Image (tube, rainbow, N blue to C red):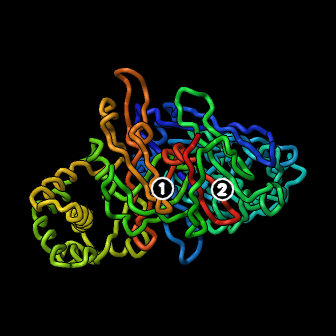
Amino acid sequence: MGNKILLGAFCLWALTCLLLPANSNGLVRIGLKKRRLDFDTIKAARFARQEGKSGAGANRMVQDLGSSDADIIPLKNYLDAQYMGEIGIGSPPQNFTVIFDTGSSNLWVPSSKCYFSIACYFHSKYKSSLSSTYIKDGDSCEIHYGSGSISGFFSQDNVQVGDLVVKDQVFIEVTKEGSLSFVLGKFDGILGLGFQEISVGNVVPVWSNMVQQDLVDDEVFSFWLNRNPEVKDGGELVFGGVDPKRFKGKHTYVPVTKKGYWQINMGDFLIGNHSTGLCKEGCAAIVDSGTSLLAGPTPIITEINHAIGAEGVVSAECKEVVSQYGDLIWELLISGVKPSKVCAQLGLCVFSGAKYASTGIESVVEKEIKEGSSAGDDLLCTACEMFVIWVQNQLREKETKEAAINYLDKLCESLPSPMGESVIDCNSISTLPNFSFTIGDKPFSLTPEQYVLKTGEGIAQVCISGFVALDVPPPRGPLWILGDVFMGVYHTVFDYGNLEVGFAEAA
């Protein structure tokens, strides 16, 4: 699943793909081009957020998998960065601009039978009557996104990607697009590069069919993103292997831990050389080409905001926990009370353990918990659980209680904005710390120049943090989304055959 956003004057990075139908050395190459967000796209993002549908910047589309054990997992919003390219459907091919998205698995495009959605009038539509290879299916389907929903029916036809033709591909003809985001989006549809496990209708994805039909030499595809704003070409997506000119050294490979998304395990997240604690014992991470930013748990994003001086929102609940319960939480942790039990013992949480919940991201169990408690209690509980994590870090750093509580009170002022925007002083970039993700026991660092996004020039220049908050409760969380900010620094290989993801420094 996949979906994204940012703020009015922010011309955030947006990337488009142009297909280069070249198949050299057994590789099918798709050239990527950068495109800045236009004003209409920004308006669409803000409109979606105001409707409460796309949430905090990194809030993602949510897909109903149609099964009893389906988790509601936040993924992305396509509006910040769009990896787009032209594909053809049918014989002769009808061309569509689609997003290449590793965070979803279905292919969908607007249908000529889409009569009542304004969005369909602004995009190319598939006409089955014009294709000699069309096969009728007709089963209905629906996908729910953070910024709207689509519905339609399944059809089958040939799909051309570059110079490859995938035969008898099942895809969705969309007859209803339910948000202004789709009206103003620069893409016609989505080509998912995830696994069949998250495919609506259990449809075999385009990439899986490429492999099954022996259209590629190697069961691998790879992304190289050019983050240099001064050049026109945005990078390259390669089907069937990797281009050795696009990376330095060797890739570090880690296994896919849960098929569906390209989900891996990562370790501690470091600010400078200091642990942030929450992921010290491991966190899940989804490598997602459909997300422009880096999304992570609110406690860590708050520490990041404080470290880089990002403007956040002062939380009264957070400060209340610090002032009223700070000493007691410190003493409980020192006395050996399990961190997951502290907030419950204080009566601030009905249930023990972290239960972070962002807009539109909650399981059925969480919903029942929330309905049984007041909104104020829930905010205090969330603030308490974040505070416990921060106190643990301060104890590891051997800080005094007074110094630690003073620091934690300041952290409250760096809580991420509910709308997701974190603005940074452009003049301070050279003084900001590096951040490091631990993947495969190896640090993958980002410098300020790599995680701060700039737009505009001179007095009109705006600098934005590449980090936004995203909270997924256990057992699926805590969860990180490694989007374009990370993939732009590290060449990324998606190894379908060995179920691994590899990272190497981009060339």
Say left or right for 27 vs 346: right
The residue tagged 1 is: 481
Q: Which residue is pictured at 22% across the width and 52% down the height?
A: 411
Are dots 2 and 1 in contact, CB under 8 Å? no
Q: Amino acid at mark 1?
A: Ile
Checking the image for residue 107, the label placed there is: none
The residue tagged 2 is: 193
Q: Is residue 180 visible?
A: no
Say left or right for 311 vs 30: left
Neighbourhood count class around disc 1 (C-alpha, 10 Å): few under 14, some 14–19, many 20 upward: many
How many marks on residues?
2
Q: Amino acid at mark 2?
A: Leu
Residue 226 locus on image (x, y percent): 58, 37
Q: Quadrant of residue 14?
A: top right
Residue 344 locus on image (x, y percent): 22, 77
Q: Quadrant of residue 206?
A: bottom right
Q: Which residue is pictured at 47% across the width and 36% down the height?
A: 12
Residue 388 locus on image (x, y percent): 23, 67
Q: Secondary structure at mark 2?
A: loop
